[in-house]
Amino acid sequence: MSGTTPEPATVGDQYDPIRLQPSPWDFYARARREEAVFYAPATGAYMVTRYDDVRQVLGAVDTFSMAGVLRVMEVLSDDARAELQKAFPPFTPDEEPGDAARLKAREPIARAFSPERVRAMHTELSATVLALLDALDDQGPGDLMMTVGRPLPIYGKAIALGFRGDDLPALVEGAYALSVLSSAGSALDATTQLHLARMVVPYQTILTGYVAERMARRGTDLISQILTAIADSPDAPGPQAAARTAVETLIALIGAGQSTTTSSFGLGVYQLLTHRDDWKALAADPTLAPAAVEELLRFDSPIQALTRRTTCPVALGGVKLESGTDVMVVFPSANRDEAEFEDGGRLRIDRSPNRHLTFGYGPRSCVGMHLARALLTAAFGELARRHSGLRLAGNDAMTLWPGMHRLVRTLDVEW
Ligand code: HEM
């Protein structure tokens, strides 16, 4: 990091996000009281813990920029990076698409997952969730992440993207592996990184195949719309680079919704099963599900922090930051800030209003939030309805991937 010289900070010196992973909330409550914006040697960034300050950062995209922030793949081992590049090598300088093409490619995505379009997909989305829960019932008690959590986001997006059923298992496996590498990669050993990277290659090959098909013959699906948008951009690249830009866009789209939705499902079920009265209430009345989803997203969010870099000197929470300073907004802290959420440390599945920040805030906030909400609402409501007696299989039923984020690896349940 360049920029502001850190002040000595007691909260910051004690901050160890990896050790806090199982239960970060008490530490952040102390930070909000004592030093709401603190420099952390462990991350090389200023951590932003209060609700209003997090909104200030995420809302001011010109002052708090994503440009120059570390790209996740840079932290992986050489072997894992080489494996990932087998099916999707980096752009060569003359292939590199302009910003306009990349931005244009995102427009149809926002349309495809707008509230109206997600509402219009309601029947298909519900059928998708029911099919996953049927598979769970066939399989019986075991790891809920394997049967429901991991497939949920890809199955949900498959409708808009026009994926064929046969491809879904490999897409689930690859998307999941890539999302773990992206969010937890630096905390994994080199063997695990390579193992996951090998699962990603078939996934990238399948996506490249879909794009090639749609290049040859456009349909009405989202992949075709992405290709059309790229072709219509002011700096439209040639056909080969356009196809690669579309694959890149798909990887980013699927990646953004993968570990987030999967882990929100796992954390949500875990919290409900450890707040038994809420689980029983949901089982008795599945119409509680939409408000419960919001509260579970607030109470236990998978993504712990996002990084931004200041583009000019700025004051934040009483701290003066120079240009070029990294800041990280801390969702699990902002989401329990008592200044915004009364009794913020308590799960209240009927909380209203509930303006949590788990989907981000401002111009860059999550474009998939309506889809995620629809999937989680259907999944929690139907799971509780079918299995009111569901319980965690033992004290260590939930395991997380190593690292700072709360990414659920396994969730063993029985009934
Ligand atoms: C519970 C599940 C989800 C959570 C917690 C979540 C969270 C977020 C957050 C916090 C951001 C803002 C990132 C930033 O400001 O840098 C974001 C962006 C994004 N999300 Fe989600 N997301 C979820 C599900 C999804 C799904 C299902 C999709 C796909 C349909 C999706 C697609 C995206 C995309 C494309 C962006 C990038 C927006 C941009 O950079 O302009 N997300 N998400």
Image (spheres, rainbow, N blue to C red):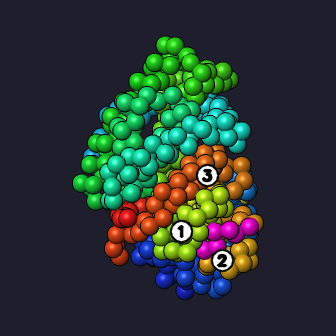
Is any atom of residue 101 visible in this view?
yes
Callout 1, which amino acid? Trp
Residue 118 magenta-drawn? Answer: no
Give the structural element (helix, strand or loop) at label 3: helix
Give the structural element (helix, strand or loop) at label 1: helix
- The residue wearing badge 2 is 344
Give the structural element (helix, strand or loop) at label 2: loop
The disc, 2 or 3, on the residue closer to the chain's N-terminal end is: 2
Side of 77 where 108 appears, left or right: right
Q: Residues within 10 Å of mark 1 (few under 14, many from 20)?
A: many
Residue 348 magenta-drawn? Answer: yes
Callout 2, which amino acid? Gly
Instruction: Report which quarter residue 357 is drawn in.
Output: bottom right
Q: Residue at x 38, y 64 (%)?
A: 415
- x, y (%) of residue 79? 27, 46
Which region of the structure is painted magenta? Answer: 347-352
Q: Which mark is residue 373?
A: 3
Q: Nearer the viewer, mark 1 or mark 2?
A: 1
Callout 3, which amino acid? Arg
Label 3 near ligand 1 (CB < 8 Å): yes
Q: Nearer the viewer, mark 2 or mark 3?
A: 3
